[in-house]
Image (cartoon, helix red, strand yellow):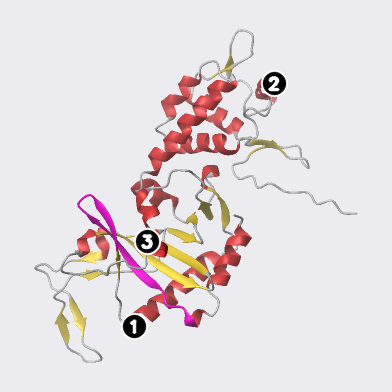
Amino acid sequence: MIKTELITLLRETLLNEELITAELYFILKQDQDTLLRFIDIEGETQEELTKQFIEKIKSELIEEEALDLISISNADDRNKVLYEYDLDEVPEEIKLINTIIEDEDIPSFDFKNDELNQIRGIVVLISNNNHNLLLYKKHYPVSLIKKDNTFTFKRIGNQKRFVSVEEDIVRINTNFEFLMIDGSLIIKELATLEKFFGFHEIIKKKAQECIVAIEQSGLLEDPDVLQELIDDISYSRKLTKVLSSSPVLNKIPTPSIIAFTDIYPALKGQFQYNADKSKIMLTTKKAKHLFAKLLNDDFLQSELTKMFYDSLAKDTILETATS
């Protein structure tokens, strides 16, 4: 998916927004089970929540012109970016939200059997104009205000008197970390995915697959040296990108790659080679990082100025022939 396609889907989903009513669900953790619960909300509150979530979608997605959309396997260090999830393995808790679309009999949250301290996430469903949009919010313990030996006050209507709140309180804001629209999972906050959903392990598996591919290419004298950085998630992401879309690995002949490392200013003198200079030897941490950048084709030269650049974000420009 490209950004314009996503924006079109979102605009279509929010058509006639005054008729939309968002549904909310809790994701609960009970013992070893992860469960969904429908949240039964008073009408006016539900209407206000719906309006606020729609405004959030508009301001942070539809109207944010600086926002990029790339696949998560091509993740880099740029800011203002959404990631479309394109890996085979999806964290279980995220897969669970699909059942909101598939299952019409999700039970409601029941204070007799469910507890507010079991909440792990909140899902917002907006179904409209033949589109299903799901927003995922990570629930943090600080969003639950528990009744203890302190006092929490609320005002009664427009009166001057305050009364004590005798129940636990759940706070919900309109921030969200992921969205799913018509089955496509879009990551808004990559850090949340990495910290809470075991995404590091998924990326490390892909990085291991990349090391195998590098070994099979015969480009390195000792590919196993890359294992030393496998726990560095930033480096593993770079290897995942190599595996997914490297324009160099198994596409450019090894002699051409080695010749390039000998003439490009940022690479010259950074690598060692075997006796007949047919393979690269990575003897330093810096060399290993430069090697990943080399396979991702991050080293460029301007056609206009002939200056050399190290570019993380490279968006392909397609030429259109005109007659």
Q: Which residues are magenta?
A: 19-36
Was residue 20 drawn as part of the magenta stretch in this picture? yes
Query: Which residue: 24% across, 89% down?
Result: 157
Q: Position of residue 317 (x, y in %)?
A: 72, 48
Residue 201: quarter of image: top left
* Residue that badge 3 annotates: 137
- Please, what secondary structure does the residue beneath circle 2 have? helix
What residue is pinned by disc 2?
259
Place of residue 297 in the rendered image (x, y in percent of width and height, measured from the top left): 64, 35
Where is residue 12? Give x, y as percent: 57, 71
Q: Name above or below for residue 226 compared with residue 159.
A: above
Helix, strand or loop at mark 3: strand
Q: Residue furthest right?
A: 323
Along the viewing direction, whichever of 182 and 226 lies nearer the viewer:
182
Can the viewer see residue 76? no
Which residue ends up furthest to the bottom in the rendered image? 159
Instruction: Look at mark 1 in the image and give the residue it sits on.
Output: 43
The amino acid sitting under disc 3 is Lys
Q: Amino acid at mark 2?
A: Ala
The question of residue 67 being in magenta is answered with no
Q: Earlier in the sequence, mark 1 or mark 2?
A: 1
Q: Given this view, does label 2 or label 3 mark the residue nearer the observer?
A: 3
Sequence-first tag of 2 and 3: 3
Q: Main secondary structure of the magenta part?
A: strand
The part of the image, by quadrant, that contains residue 11 is: bottom right
Question: Do the CB atoms of the residues marked 1 and 3 lie less than 8 Å apart?
Answer: no
Sequence-wise, the earlier of marks 1 and 3 is: 1
Dots 2, 3 in contact, CB < 8 A = no
Can residue 303 be seen? Answer: yes
**How many numbered discs, if any?**
3
Task: Single out the mark in the foreground, 1 or 3.
Answer: 1
Whole-angstrom CA distance, mark 2 to mark 3, is 49 Å
